[in-house]
Amino acid sequence: MKKVFLAALISAAIASPALADQGHGKVTFKGEIIDAPCSISSDSIDQTVWLGQIANSVLANGGTSTAKQFNIELEDCVFPKDADDKVYNDKVSITFSGSSAGFNPKLLGVTGLDATDPTIAGNVGIQLTDTNGKALDMGVATSQEHQLQAGDNTLRYSAYVQGASVDVDKIPLGKFEGVTNFTLAYN
């Protein structure tokens, strides 16, 4: 009798909701070790900039949307010194790359727009600009290098949508996406 009672008590304890799996998951940690004086913030590596809902009439005849700012955050910058104790690699230039807009190869191309008429599908692109509002061309390193400080640094850029020099009925409609990669070069 005692053995039966003990077995029942152990079975009840094991079946208790407190011991049941009430959810589980997995955490995967990923990263990359790079040969550079600064780390790129995880928030900057894969970001999305919402450019908003833009009226096609704004983009007609080469028009542009309102610019939206985005940042590339550099963290934990430590700069090497040469034999004369002079700091180097404390300046950085950036190159943005991606598919070009059909009407202007200097602009970032977009996908997802109404392409029922292939002649108008490429009539919209994204212009990237530096902190001074100077246009940046796809695939070309910035001419202005950013002077970096030890520690954390913020590189500021903006983007806006630009239409081709066409009438409003030649500006395609719909949701769009443009993806650019960036490459840093320290000097």
Image (tube, rainbow, N blue to C red):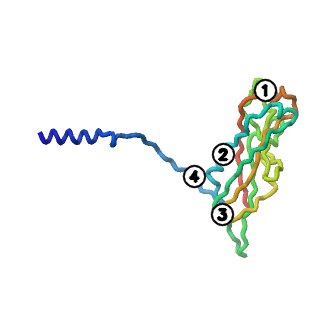
Q: Which mark is residue 47?
A: 2
Give yes or no for contact between labels 1 and 3 (Cβ–Cβ under 8 Å). Answer: no
- Could you tell me if the residues under marks 2 and 3 are in contact, i.e. CB atoms within 8 Å? no
**Given the current orientation, which residue lies at the most extreme top position?**
116
Query: Which residue is at 71% across, 36% downward?
Result: 177
Residue at the far bottom: name it. Answer: 84
Quadrant of the image occupied by residue 175: top right
- Mark 3 vs 4: CB contact within 8 A: no
Tell me how far mark 2 sits from mark 3, CA to CA.
22 Å
Image-quadrant location for residue 109: top right
Asked if one can make out residue 91 in the rendered structure from this viewpoint, the answer is yes
Disc with the residue nearer the chain's start (3 vs 4): 4
What secondary structure is found at the residue carrying circle 1?
A: loop
Tell me the element at label 2.
loop
Depth check, mark 2 against mark 4: the one in front is: 2
Residue 122 location (% of width, % of height) = 79, 32
What's under tag 4, amino acid-wise? Gly
Q: Secondary structure at mark 3?
A: strand
The residues bearing labels 1 and 3 have C-alpha atoms spaced at a distance of: 48 Å
Tell me if residue 141 comes above or below residue 120 in the rendering: below
Spatial CA distance of label 1 from label 2 is: 29 Å
The residue where tag 1 is placed is: 118
Where is residue 168 drawn, in percent x and y? 84, 28
Q: Nearer the viewer, mark 1 or mark 2?
A: 2
- Residue 31: mark: 4
Q: Amino acid at mark 3?
A: Gly
Q: CA distance from mark 1 to mark 4?
A: 40 Å
Say left or right for 81 vs 139.
left
Which amino acid type corresponds to the residue marked 1 in the rendered image? Pro
Q: Residue under label 3, please give it.
A: 151
Question: Local crowd at mark 2 within 10 Å, few (<14), some, or many (≥20)?
Answer: few
